[in-house]
Image (tube, rainbow, N blue to C red):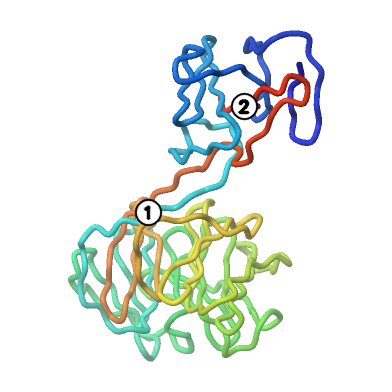
Amino acid sequence: MSVYLGDLELATGGGATGTGLPVNTYESFLVNGTGNPAGYDATTGLYTHPNGDYWLKTGNTINTDKTIYPDAGGTTSTNWAATGNTFTGPGSNAGLAAPTDGFLYAATLGGAIQRWSKAGVLQATLPSLGTINQRSFGTNGSNNLLAAGGGTVREYTTAGVATGFSFSYTGQMSTNNVYGVDSNGTYIWVLNGQTGEAFRYTQAGVYTGFSITNPSNQEDVAIVREEALFIEDANIPDGFDPTTGAALPASGAVAGSLFAPDLADTTKFWTNYVGTIREYTLTFSKIFGDSTARTDTDSGQPLFIKLK
């Protein structure tokens, strides 16, 4: 028989005995139905080998918590669930930021920033930040705020005081096209609202030469930890892998043309939908397995991929 390794085949001399094959490699098994062999579930295609390994029959996928099979390859999947917490905010075009201090911040017309509790109580209005685009408002991935406008991204404390850090994005777009800015603490992303292209910068404000494009209607960009970049598409955040730019599968209803990940509670996400602030729970799972059914070229038996 043989072990299928992607586009390669490695000859072996015996049956599938779980003898330490690496995760993400392929092995053929003779299966006749649920429980035959013991540990096989024909409905899901999952085979729990007697030695504790987990194998999934090709042609099947499993969408589950990414920590279940930590070393297995797969695609990140997002799920949105409204919590029911909503309140009337400062306006339909107000960008949102939710830094680590536990408050929400909203950019109002004219550059003034409002601080809100997450129960919808206005706490304070900060001094005007000057030339900023209302939509282009986020965090530095921690407890400072980022605001873009007039060709420049600037950083402020949550008291509205400039930290002195700034950089220009005019090498990538005109001063009038900026529609979003946000960071996960590793990279800063700035969105061209006319083309839907999000440009990636280092935390020092240096353009990395990498960008991701959402080819539809865009108004904001937000990054959640290292897992997903979201670009708004007709009031629905579309998710992308921030490393490859590949689109991410999503489930659950969500609405909002301006949105922000909550850095104090990383399971929460906030949107501004026509002036209504809404809270969502955002969870990440992973789609494991190989959706293409494959068979072993020697034995004709179905191939399984090792998950763990």
Question: Quadrant location of the N terminus?
Answer: top right
Q: Which residue is mark 1?
A: 282
Q: Is residue 161 above or below residue 23?
A: below
Q: Position of residue 290 (x, y in %)?
A: 61, 38
What mark, if any, has residue 304 been given in the picture? 2
Look at 47% across and 85% down and name the residue there.
Answer: 133
CA gap, disc 2 and disc 1:
31 Å
- 18 or 223: nearer the viewer: 18
In this rendering, which labeled residue sits more in front, label 2 or label 1? 2
- 250 or 240: nearer the viewer: 250
- 102 or 52: nearer the viewer: 52
Mark 1 Cα shell of 10 Å, populated few (<14), some (14-19), many (≥20): many
Quarter of the figure with residue 211 = bottom right
Q: Position of residue 103 (x, y in %)?
A: 29, 64
**Amino acid type assigned to the residue bearing label 2 in the image:** Phe
Q: Position of residue 147 (x, y in %)?
A: 48, 77
Q: Earlier in the sequence, mark 2 or mark 1?
A: 1
Quarter of the figure with residue 304 = top right
Q: Is residue 95 above or below residue 133?
A: above
Relative side of 114 to 16, left or right: left
Quarter of the figure with residue 197 = bottom right
